[in-house]
């Protein structure tokens, strides 16, 4: 895309003081008639390996047709003496472009320049916004401890133990063996009883007689 510098901007560019590169360009507008001035100007804009030359054409009208691509073409119109408004700058000129001075006057000379354009630094990517931190969960309500049960009241002494020593039901004799009883023992007891009775009877008879 062709860029055309306005009259005011062209005057500003023509008046720039540049140090280094092809040399020193002063604010004197008459120096803008020389290719070295525009080489220094482009180098101040970041261009490298800049070469400018005055095109040898016979200018009889107010237009000029570019023969090749140029980074910058400076059209000078009017008298041979340069002024702050006499230079018209055209950027990124393609072959075949028809150029004319912004004033409409006849062109007095053309200076065409080429060079290595400065590299446009890439814009840094915007950092991603940090995500909203999640809110911590609210701690659950602790369960209330269960109330301890009411202890049972101890019973009154004697209430439950009064009958502890009272036997319930008939007494069962447990010291007589249930089995293995000697059959002679009862007979001996009966015999002893009979002897005692007989002796007692004999005693009574003796007493009565």
Image: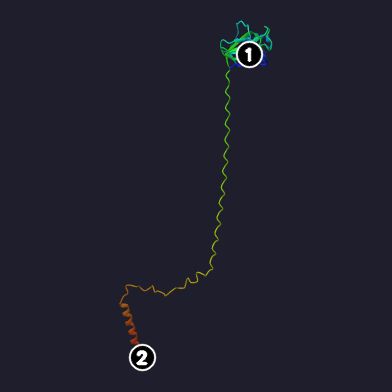
- Is residue 85 or residue 120 the one in the foreground? 85
Name the quarter where the N terminus is drawn.
top right
Marks 2,1: beta carbons within 8 A = no
Q: Earlier in the sequence, mark 2 or mark 1?
A: 1
Q: Position of residue 100 (x, y in %)?
A: 63, 12
- Residue 182 image point, x, y percent: 31, 75
Q: Quadrant of residue 88?
A: top right
**Viewer-side residue, 161 vs 50:** 50
SS of the residue under disc 2: helix
The residue that disc 2 covers is: 204
For residue 157, side relative to residue 204 (left or right) = right
Q: Estimate the spatial distance between the alpha carbons at disc 2 and disc 1, rounded to whole Å.
A: 183 Å
Which image quadrant for residue 208?
bottom left
The answer to whether 200 is drawn above or below residue 79 in the figure is below
Q: Is residue 69 left or right of residue 6?
A: left
Packing grade of label 1 (10 A; few <14, some 14-19, many >=20) is many
Q: Is residue 133 above or below residue 74?
A: below
Residue at 63% x, 11% y: name it. Answer: 75
Where does the image place residue 185, in percent across and percent down from the top left?
A: 32, 78
Instruction: Classify 10 Å Cα crowding around label 2: few (below 14), some (14-19), many (20 and above).
Output: few
Check the image and name the residue furthest to the left. 184
Q: Which residue is mark 1?
A: 89
User: Which residue is located at x 63 percent, y 13 percent?
Assistant: 89
In this picture the colour scheme is rainbow
**Callout 1 secondary element:** strand
Relative image position of residue 83 (x, y in whole percent):
69, 10
């Amino acid at each position: 895309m062709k860029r055309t510098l306005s009259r005011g901007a062209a005057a500003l560019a023509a008046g720039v003081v540049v140090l280094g590169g092809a040399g020193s360009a002063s604010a004197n507008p008459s120096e803008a008639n020389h290719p070295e001035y525009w080489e220094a100007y482009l180098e101040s804009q970041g261009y490298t390996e800049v070469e400018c030359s005055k095109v040898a054409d016979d200018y009889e009208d107010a237009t000029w047709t570019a023969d090749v691509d140029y980074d910058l073409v400076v059209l000078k119109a009017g008298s041979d003496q340069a002024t702050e408004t006499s230079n018209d700058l055209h950027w990124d000129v393609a072959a075949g472009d028809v150029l004319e001075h912004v004033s409409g006057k006849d062109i007095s000379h053309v200076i065409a320049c080429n060079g290595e354009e400065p590299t446009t630094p890439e814009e840094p990517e915007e950092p991603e916004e940090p995500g909203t931190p999640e809110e911590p969960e609210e701690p659950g309500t602790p369960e209330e401890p269960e109330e301890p049960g009411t202890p049972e009241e101890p019973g009154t002494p004697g209430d439950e133990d009064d009958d502890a020593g009272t036997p319930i039901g008939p007494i069962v004799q447990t010291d007589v063996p249930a089995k293995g009883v000697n059959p002679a023992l009862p007979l001996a007891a009966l015999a002893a009883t009979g002897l005692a009775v007989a002796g007692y009877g004999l005693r009574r008879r003796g007493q009565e007689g």
